């Protein structure tokens, strides 16, 4: 019997290198998760929290985030003291204190020699002080000065002192936080929020029927009208208490389909619209033989890029399910590999795949049970060293 899950993992490892390499070519993910888009032809370096952005000549923009300043320098320093200290410590330059221009939101220092100009800033934000300076030939200075606010706009829009903070969620779960089409574990899972995704903007909130808190997140997914994540699976930052209650979409239940007869390979529709999971916590998959069919299409995405669709190796075969602990634990045996699933909610199970083929890869399968003999699944794969992930749908038909 072929190891069907291994086949999918192998194909996911063959994601075109261009898709992985393309992510981040023009974008930089900072230590705090903020993503900056570089102008065409610019590159960057990062050295112990000091970012240097440059088109490759004597022009540069440098940046240190509040986290770096707080870890490196005395947090009790004023903005002007901080700027003087940074230049003396990091660049071995002495600033003319009389030329410091103290402003409401920080301090500015302008310097100029025969053919070059520069501006250095320490800005006060809600989360601390941030250092920025930029330097360019006099003839190019005006154009570079226009690049700075555009490049750094994700750091400035609502981060300055006194401005309300947007609400973000992130996760540190290795297998990711399920993103569902509505609030509640009885809603279908569309994809997952992975640790590599960093902070994702929250645009709504509500409580599910069981009283759990859910956040609606902003996602560039053309095939999903709404995406929701459970508060229990994420960490929030910002002014999340200012997010207003949101009306959740209604649940649309699919008509149940008849199970495949015993001894048959069964007929599955891996590309069919998945049914919503049952709200009955007692629903567990029946023990016995199931026919597993791998969907014909994988969804692949890298941070900063669009979701790509790629053919998957359509394959099917028999797997054996066992149930224990009153339905709290389910095991699936595929050839010589056994995957253990833990009950994660109404009709929902999740199990990590053992020994992924790539050292920095992790993979897990989610099962959605609508009845003891009706079930669908999703295989998700992510990487700890690159912000890319892939998913493929799985169909199951009960054989008895």
Image (cartoon, rainbow, N blue to C red):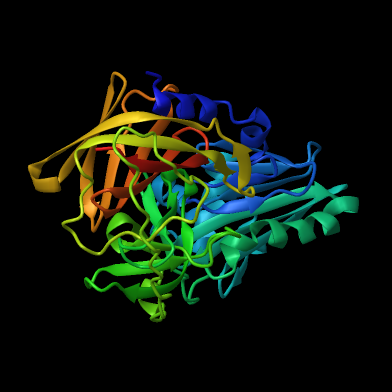
* Residue 387 at x, y percent in the picture: 52, 40
Residue appearing at x 14%, y 46% in the figure: 328
Query: Can residue 181 be seen at all in this image of the molecule?
Result: yes
Q: Is residue 65 above or below residue 251?
A: above
- Classify residue 109 as left or right of residue 400: right
Q: In which quarter of the image is residue 183?
A: bottom left
- Classify residue 68 as left or right of residue 339: right
How many badges with numbers are in the image?
0
Q: In this view, does 123 lie above or below 300?
A: below
* Residue 240 at x, y percent in the picture: 38, 72
* Residue 125 at x, y percent in the picture: 49, 66
Query: Can residue 92 be seen at all in this image of the molecule?
Result: no
Task: Say which quadrant the N terminus sits in.
Answer: top left
Q: Nearer the viewer, residue 284 or 28?
A: 284
* Residue 6 at x, y percent in the picture: 42, 24
Residue appearing at x 59%, y 31% in the figure: 15
- Classify residue 279 as left or right of residue 8: left
Q: Which of 29 and 326 is in front in this view?
A: 326
Residue appearing at x 57%, y 44% in the figure: 301
Q: Nearer the viewer, residue 206 or 164?
A: 206
Task: Say which quadrant the C terminus sits in.
Answer: top left
- Classify residue 400 as left or right of residue 237: left
Q: Residue furthest right?
A: 139
Q: In which quarter of the image is residue 352?
A: top left
Q: In which quarter of the image is residue 261?
A: top left
Residue appearing at x 49%, y 24% in the figure: 10
């Amino acid at each position: 019997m072929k190891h069907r899950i291994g086949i999918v993992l192998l194909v996911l490892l063959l994601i075109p290198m261009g898709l992985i390499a393309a992510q981040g070519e023009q974008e930089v993910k900072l230590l705090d998760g903020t993503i900056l888009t570089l102008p065409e032809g610019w590159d960057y370096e990062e050295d112990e929290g000091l970012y240097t952005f440059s088109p490759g000549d004597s022009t540069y923009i440098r940046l240190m985030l509040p986290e770096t300043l707080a870890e490196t320098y005395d947090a009790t320093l004023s903005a002007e003291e901080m700027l003087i200290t940074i230049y003396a410590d990091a660049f071995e330059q002495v600033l003319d204190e009389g030329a410091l221009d103290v402003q409401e939101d920080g301090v500015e220092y302008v310097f100029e020699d025969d053919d070059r100009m520069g501006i250095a800033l320490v800005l006060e934000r809600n989360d601390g002080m941030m250092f920025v300076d930029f330097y360019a030939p006099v003839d190019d200075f005006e154009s570079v000065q226009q690049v700075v606010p555009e490049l750094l706009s994700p750091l400035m829009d609502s981060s300055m002192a006194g401005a309300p903070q947007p609400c973000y969620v992130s996760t540190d779960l290795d297998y990711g936080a399920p993103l569902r089409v509505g609030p509640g574990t009885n809603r279908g899972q569309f994809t997952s929020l992975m640790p590599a995704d960093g902070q994702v903007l929250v645009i709504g909130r509500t409580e599910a029927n069981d009283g759990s808190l859910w956040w609606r997140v902003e996602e560039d997914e053309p095939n999903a009208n709404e995406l929701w994540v459970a508060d229990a699976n994420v960490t929030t930052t910002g002014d999340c208490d200012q997010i207003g209650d949101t009306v959740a979409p209604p649940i649309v239940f699919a008509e149940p389909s008849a199970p495949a007869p015993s001894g048959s390979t069964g007929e599955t529709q891996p590309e069919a619209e998945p049914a919503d999971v049952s709200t009955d916590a007692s629903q567990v998959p029946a023990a016995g033989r199931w026919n597993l069919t791998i969907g014909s299409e994988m969804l692949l995405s890298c941070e900063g890029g669009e979701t790509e669709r790629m053919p998957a190796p359509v394959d099917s075969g028999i797997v054996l399910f066992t149930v224990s602990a009153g339905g709290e634990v389910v095991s699936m045996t595929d050839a010589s590999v056994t995957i253990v699933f833990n009950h994660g909610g109404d009709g929902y199970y999740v199990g990590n795949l053992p020994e992924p083929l790539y050292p920095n890869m992790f993979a897990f399968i989610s099962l959605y049970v609508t009845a003891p003999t009706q079930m669908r699944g999703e295989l998700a794969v992510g990487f700890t060293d690159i912000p890319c992930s892939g998913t493929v749908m799985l169909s199951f038909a009960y054989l008895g």
